[in-house]
């Protein structure tokens, strides 16, 4: 197989991509250069969603070739005008890549890359994790359809991350033969090794987290306390369960602007065994997955939440809203857990009640969750990328 010279353009160092870039860079058929638009994540920054100033505590740029493009934006950020990196033109013109993988289309630099690829006849492989179900104004939909249909006609291939994401690309005109599966994945090897090493420490991990009722099944939420995540509905479901006499612990890992409201709800309704653990950095998360039995994500819109994959690597039973884009693939098709109608607190409570009360069902779901997520791996991602690279380099007709 040919050794492909590949550019990969992404906004900034992201914790989920670093191990994938290392593996891809080590592959004998890939000569990879990753381009970043700004240094968010490497340096201490304020995240308004968490309401925290922090820096990721894992290596983000080690083990692969990368270049930080000079950003001319006055306010560098993951926004359209927060990424203004004209240097991508020079890189594409001088490095002569076999393909350029572009993550998304919502920054000015992405569009610089598209133009640079067209000018240099470099095949474009676009990737993203969007679906069609986010509610937006009609006029925005119309503009989006015109712009994306025109853009996607001129890309050589696309990497889709889950079924609804594939439907998104098909809706905007990318034909089936140009679509290659690239599953939403996390570092399964890392998380499964952590799951094995922490398995016998669940009791001590619960004690460290301040949990008093060690034998109660434990429900876990990981994320930001913001309206889109609908954490308040999880607490409402917890109240319904408590009123039924169902015994459980609920651990909320994260932080954000709604925290005081959530704590007020717990106090007002005398909810028991609810634990606010605060924001936890990447290296701290495994111990929380390890102490739990059930993972809940009540989000109104979450195309590909990586916390779901992380939780499934620990065999946690997922109970998520149908606002989670990967739910049909990871849960519904595999019998790994429950998907409920967004906003239906009673259905959420019902599912949680079943998982908590019936240990046999919980164990079956747990096994299915672990077997399912094993298939959504970085190895599959690399396979998808290689298939796309082979396709766009078959003949001149596949060039951008």
Image (cartoon, grey):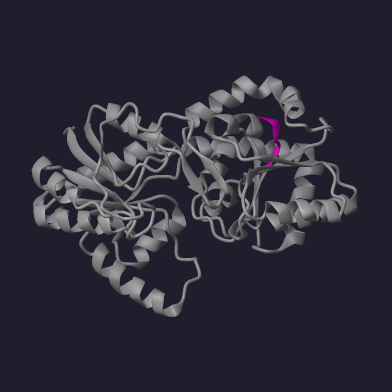
The N terminus: image quadrant: top left
Judge whether residue 394 can be spotted in this image: no
274, 339: nearer the viewer: 274
Drawn side of residue 75 relative to residue 322, left or right = left
Q: Which residue is drawn at 54% across and 60% down?
A: 301
Residue extending farthest to the front is: 74
Q: What stretch is highlighted in magenta?
A: 290-294
Position of 257 relative to 38 (above/below):
below
Residue extending farthest to the bottom is: 139
Drawn side of residue 79 relative to residue 226, left or right = left
Residue 265: image quadrant is bottom right
Q: Where is residue 2 in the image (x, y as percent from the top left)?
A: 16, 34
Q: Position of residue 56 (x, y in %)?
A: 48, 35
Q: Where is residue 296 in the image (x, y as percent from the top left)?
A: 66, 48
Q: Which residue is drawn at 40% across and 74% down?
A: 141
353, 76: nearer the viewer: 76
Q: Residue at x 32, y 55 (%)?
A: 74
Q: Where is residue 344 in the image (x, y as percent from the top left)?
A: 71, 63
Judge whether residue 78 can be spotted in this image: yes
Magenta region includes residue 291: yes
Drawn side of residue 71 relative to residue 170, left or right = left
Q: Residue at x 29, y 62 (%)?
A: 174
Position of 210 relative to 221 (above/below):
above
275, 77: nearer the viewer: 77
Position of 289 relative to 159 (above/below):
above
Magenta region includes residue 78: no
The C terminus: image quadrant: bottom left
Drawn side of residue 266 relative to residue 177, left or right = right
- Count the marks: how many? 0
């Amino acid at each position: 197989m040919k050794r492909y010279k590949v550019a990969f353009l992404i906004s900034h160092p992201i914790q989920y991509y670093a191990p994938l870039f290392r593996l891809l860079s080590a592959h004998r058929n890939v000569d990879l250069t990753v381009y970043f638009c700004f240094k968010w994540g490497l340096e201490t920054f304020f995240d308004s969603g968490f309401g925290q100033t922090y820096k990721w505590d894992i290596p983000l740029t080690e083990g692969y070739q990368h270049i930080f493009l000079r950003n001319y934006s006055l306010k560098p950020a993951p926004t359209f005008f927060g990424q203004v990196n004209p240097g991508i033109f020079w890189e594409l013109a001088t490095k002569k890549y076999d393909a350029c993988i572009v993550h998304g289309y919502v920054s000015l630099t992405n569009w610089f890359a598209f133009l640079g690829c067209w000018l240099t006849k470099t095949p474009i492989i676009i990737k993203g994790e969007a679906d069609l179900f986010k509610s937006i104004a009609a006029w925005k939909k119309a503009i989006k359809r015109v712009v994306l249909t025109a853009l996607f006609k001129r890309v050589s291939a696309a990497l889709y991350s889950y079924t609804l994401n594939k439907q998104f690309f098909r809706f905007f005109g990318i034909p089936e033969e140009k679509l290659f599966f690239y599953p939403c994945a996390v570092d399964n090897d890392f998380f499964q090794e952590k799951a094995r090493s922490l398995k016998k420490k669940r009791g001590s991990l619960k004690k460290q987290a301040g949990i008093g009722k060690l034998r109660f099944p434990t429900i876990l939420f990981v994320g930001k306390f913001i309206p889109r995540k609908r954490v308040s509905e999880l607490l409402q479901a917890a109240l319904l369960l408590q009123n039924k006499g169902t015994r459980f612990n609920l651990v909320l890992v994260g932080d954000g602007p709604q925290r005081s409201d959530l704590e007020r709800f717990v106090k007002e309704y005398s909810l028991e065994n609810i634990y606010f653990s605060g924001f936890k950095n990447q290296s701290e998360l495994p111990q929380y997955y390890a102490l739990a039995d059930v993972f809940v994500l009540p989000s109104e819109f979450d195309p590909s939440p990586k916390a779901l994959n992380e939780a499934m690597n620990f065999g946690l039973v997922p109970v998520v809203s149908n606002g989670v884009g990967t739910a049909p693939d990871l849960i519904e098709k595999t019998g790994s857990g429950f998907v409920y109608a967004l906003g239906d607190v009673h259905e959420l409570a019902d599912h949680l009640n079943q998982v908590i009360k019936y240990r046999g069902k919980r164990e079956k779901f747990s096994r299915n969750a672990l077997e399912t997520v094993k298939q959504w791996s970085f190895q599959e991602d690399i396979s998808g990328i290689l298939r796309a690279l082979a396709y766009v380099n078959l003949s001149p007709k596949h060039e951008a």
